Amino acid sequence: MRTNLPREMDFVHEAENAARAAADFKDVRTSLYIPKVIVATRRVLIMEYIQGGRVDDLKYLTDWNIDRNNVAIELSRIFSRMVFINGWFHAVCLSYSYGLVSMVNCL
């Protein structure tokens, strides 16, 4: 905690991690979309707004005819690749439930 927490709260570091994650997936066929960083300072991170719904919003998934199984499979593929192949995962991209968005054209 003493080492990692200050880095996690430094949004310049988080913006660099977003760029690293995007580079890790640039040649991989996936629906992962990492919002573009607009501004990153130590205390402020502004990223592109993405229209979509939470992956745990079953009504949204049903209304937009998004297959929950496909969402689960894709999230599993992305997490597995980040952890087991790339050796790390980028929390801003994936780990928070409010940060996970199903976009109609992606899945």
Image: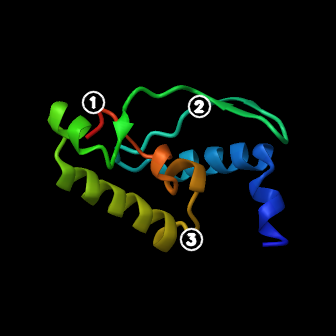
Q: Amino acid at mark 2?
A: Lys
* CB within 8 Å, label 2 to label 3: no
Looking at the rendered structure, the secondary structure element under dot 2 is: loop
Q: Nearer the viewer, residue 72 or 96?
A: 96
Q: Amino acid at mark 3?
A: Gly
Q: Which residue is mark 3?
A: 87
Q: Which numbered disc, 2 or 3, marks the residue closer to the eye? A: 2
Q: Nearer the viewer, residue 98 or 91?
A: 98
**Image side of residue 14 versus residue 79, left or right:** right
Marks 2 and 3, Cα distance to the nearest angstrom?
23 Å
Q: Residue at x 23, y 45 (%)?
A: 58
Q: Position of residue 13 (x, y in %)?
A: 77, 50
Looking at the rendered structure, the secondary structure element under dot 3 is: loop
Q: Which residue is mark 2?
A: 36
**N-terminal label among 3 and 1:** 3
Q: Amino acid at mark 1?
A: Asn
**Image side of residue 60 versus residue 13, left or right:** left
Q: Position of residue 100 (x, y in %)?
A: 43, 46
Q: Residue at x 62, y 46 (%)?
A: 18
Q: Is residue 44 above or below residue 75?
A: above
Q: Residue at x 84, y 72 (%)?
A: 2
Q: Which residue is mark 1?
A: 105
**N-terminal label among 2 and 1:** 2
Marks 3 and 1, Cα distance to the nearest angstrom?
29 Å
